[in-house]
Amino acid sequence: MQRVLFHSTIFGPIHSRRLGTSLGVNLSPNDGKVCTFDCLYCEAGYNAQGPGTTGLPSRAQVAQQLEAKLRQMKAEGQKLDVITFSGNGEPTAHPDFGGIIDDVIALRDKYFPAVKISVLSNSTQLGRPEVESALRRVDNNIVKLDSAIDSTIRVLDRPTSARFNADEVIRQIARFGPQCIVQTMILTGRDDNGNPVDNTTDTEIDALIDAYRRINPNEVMLYSIDRPTPARNLHKVSREELERIAERIRRAGIAVQVS
Ligand code: SF4
């Protein structure tokens, strides 16, 4: 099974297509995956691999390791554009997420005050007030919405909670309005059981446009598969097709970036 795990809490810096020179923060275990989704395309692999043995890093460990790395990068005159929460699972599921955000803001202000803080989240934890409030304190609050149709999300992103409800998540994202960037993975293909998945259809794009209108985000980011995925029958959508979809969304008055 395809899986590329980050084997540390602080990783990089790496060059990100979307964000520039990025230092990563992984709030999941270093040898396993913990996520509230189980996306067919997840680069960390399926949740079935298990959470590993190292457990979640503590708030103190994150702060210590990040400070050591920032101090070293500053001493060496290294360039940094952004500190990005991503990694082997869902960062906002960490029980100390709000406190960790406070620590990271303080360390950013101390060592690299011009650097942005980005959080890539899957939007499933937005109903927790401490998560919503922490995401309001970061520079780039990038939330996932791969489809506005519940049944599609159940095949494509495979939420681990049976209570997942796409409409409720869209309402929660909409509370941020321009304080969020919505990221949407566009792909076609089949899951491992042969069920079709295709969020390029007119029905899907119309539903997404309706959701984007309700959310009124700062921007929508469209992208497709870039690396091998755990589900073997997924297909990358071409740049031309992404641009065609982006143009439809732009005509609805929403800013879109294709990456
Ligand atoms: S939300 Fe992100 S980390 Fe979680 S399964 Fe999907 S791609 Fe992987």
Image (spheres, rainbow, N blue to C red):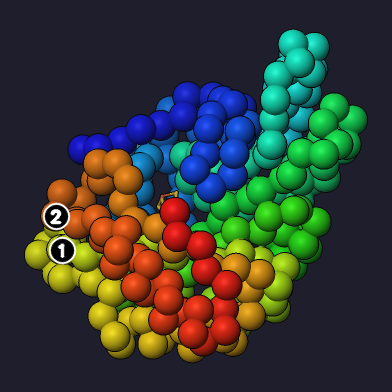
- The picture places residue 82, in percent across and down from the top left corner, at 68, 39
Figure disc tally: 2
- Screen quadrant of the N terminus: top left
When the figure is inspected, residue 72 is found, relative to residue 155, above or below; the finding is above
- Screen quadrant of the C terminus: bottom left
When the figure is inspected, residue 2 is found, relative to residue 250, above or below; the finding is above
For image coordinates 57% across by 52% down, the residue present is 120
- The picture places residue 140, in percent across and down from the top left corner, at 68, 55
- The picture places residue 192, in percent across and down from the top left corner, at 14, 57
Q: Give the mark nearest the N terminus, 2 or 1.
A: 1
When the figure is inspected, residue 59 is found, relative to residue 133, above or below; the finding is above
Q: Are marks 2 and 1 in contact (CB under 8 Å)?
A: yes
For image coordinates 55% across by 43% down, the residue present is 86
The residue at which mark 1 appears reads as: 190
Q: Nearer the viewer, residue 118 or 10?
A: 118
For image coordinates 77% across by 62% down, the residue present is 136
Q: Secondary structure at mark 2?
A: loop
Question: In the shown orientation, is residue 206 left or right of residue 82?
Answer: left
Q: Is residue 161 visible?
A: no
The residue at which mark 2 appears reads as: 233
Residue 128, located in which quarter of the rendered image? bottom right
Measured Cα–Cα span from mark 2 to mark 1: 5 Å
Question: In the shown orientation, is residue 129 left or right of residue 180?
Answer: right
As drawn, which residue projects farthest toward the top?
A: 76
Q: Is mark 2 within 8 Å of ligand 1?
A: no
Q: Amino acid at mark 2?
A: Asn
Q: Nearer the viewer, residue 227 or 69?
A: 227
